Image: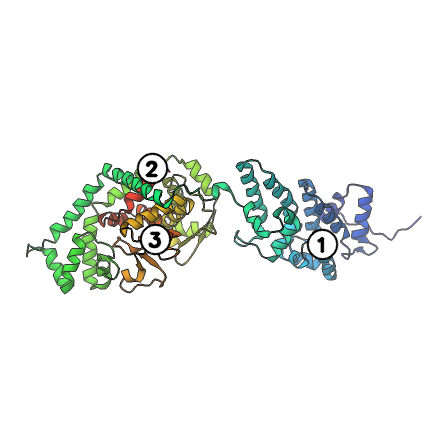
Amino acid sequence: MLKTTLKAPKTDKKTKVIIGMCNSVDELSAAILSFWDREGVSGSSYSFILDRLSALSLKTSVSESDITAFTNLASAVLGKTFTAAKKELGYGKSIFLTKAGEITRVHPLAIENQKIWRFMFVTGDFFRLRSVASEWKNAKTPEERDSAALRMREILYPIMVDNIKFKFPAISAVMSRIGDLLNDQMFNIFQMLRVGTEEPASQTLTSESASDAYQQRKTTGADFLRSMSVPGRIEEAKAEIANMLDSKNPESLEWINVRNLFGERAEAVRTALLSGKFGFGSPGEQDGCANFINSGPSHGAEWLKDVIQTSIKKVIPQVELIREELLNATEINDSQAEEWISGIKISRALISEYDIYSGADGSFLRDLKAVFKLARGRIRTLKNIDILRGRSFANIQKKQIALNPRGGKRALWHEVGHHFEFSNPDYLLMARAYLAERTNGENAAVASLNRFYRNGVYGDKEVAIADHLSSPYIGKIYGGYHIDTATFTEVFSSGFEYLAQPNSGAISLVNSDGLIEFVTGVLKEGH
């Protein structure tokens, strides 16, 4: 009997996967020669995997069954991480990487990157990339192109940084596979990642027509507020102050309190109260109640807060009513809001902590759903909501909100309000028109935010319009020192915040900001 020294492979998972890859006797023979020799499993030759890699790399469209078979093979033999593969390959690592690089045209150093290793040998998305890119190039309708873009994101986001940029390993992998489809320019990939429904709406207004559009929305909002008796409540709030501070009546207890608490500044405090300047007042002058609260004696500050609260409590219910009426009038239903939320990547830690601070489970998702309904679905640019321990912010480039969970609904609605403006360029133009009206058309009428506050903490380049808004922050502009060139504003973010926090909304109304009228006009009237 002829005795053979060839050892039979063990019937473990690795063996089954290798044999399962073979479609013919010749392939099975190649597998045996590649993986099993006279010493058993050698680990020194992986030509079988490289041959399969070469076969797939030559195809412009690779079937799912072929991709699955290859990734099962690679994972079973080499492991699911480059760390595991490096251990398995041993001294043959450099040879394997060099040959894999020659086959795929991906730089060997890029293949060593964990994300790219997974991209090529574990998920197999490297092989899917070309067919999806071709679908995008050949799309006949916006819907087909958006569908391809979404699939492209599924493939590429795992190898990107924060879903917005590529580093060398990813660039090498992408360009090797679809460089010709990108006209050999990597930046063209970002066009393929755009989804039309997530891009800002088209701008239809000019600077001139935006002024008329703003006036129309302001009128709509003012009519809406009148229908809920808001002007009457504002007058009642001011009358309450006037009755309390009758300087002609020497027996007026509150007027005596003002004089005793604020001394020589008593008349300035009284003037601020009577004029409804419950905020910080004008830049330099700092003649609003909030500045007197921050700079006066502690007992005087408490008294002033109580007086303001007594006044605005007549208006607070109306702000709550405005919000509820807007939510009731929206055409966005719960299912649509939930579908929108499902497309946003949200930090789980944020949801948990937000709910804890709010004192009710489910608060975050309820508040997020509500603000989308408030906006009537006109938010297209928000795709990521992350947790932040510092000051919350919104970012248009990253399609992101970074939110401090302690800020609650007020902060959430404020940052979503930014994306409402980001998503609608026409609203930015209207916001500029609102700010320009407050400065009587003086586009350069801006001042450092620090000039509005006693002991301001803002940066030197942070500016707002020179006005006496209830909060100077409403008038903050970005992108320069002129209203007509502002790249974005705090108008809608403040408006959304004040609808979430009726106390601030009431102060804004009594202060005659005109903000609530404008923002509710935009929310009330479709555009």
Work out how far the residue at label 3 is from the one at label 2, CA to CA, in angstroms.
Answer: 25 Å
Residue 169 falls in image quadrant: bottom right
Residue 378 falls in image quadrant: top left
- In this view, the mark in front (3 or 2): 3
Q: Can you say whether 143 is above or below 193 in the image?
A: above
Work out how far the residue at label 3 is from the one at label 1, CA to CA, in angstroms.
Answer: 56 Å
Query: In the rendered image, which quarter contains the C terminus?
Result: top left
Residue 165 visible? The answer is yes
Looking at the rendered structure, the kind of residue marked 1 is Ala
- In this view, the mark in front (2 or 1): 2
Q: Between residues 202 and 152, which one lies in front from this camera angle?
A: 202
Query: Left or right: where does residue 265 sit relative to residue 214?
Result: left
Query: Left or right: where does residue 196 sit relative to residue 434?
Result: right
Residue at 48% x, 51% y is: 398
- Residue position for label 1: 100
Tell me, for residue 525, which label it has, or none. Answer: 2
- Residue position for label 3: 483
Disc with the residue nearer the chain's start (2 vs 1): 1
- In this view, the mark in front (3 or 1): 3
Work out how far the residue at label 2 is from the one at label 1, CA to CA, in angstroms.
Answer: 59 Å
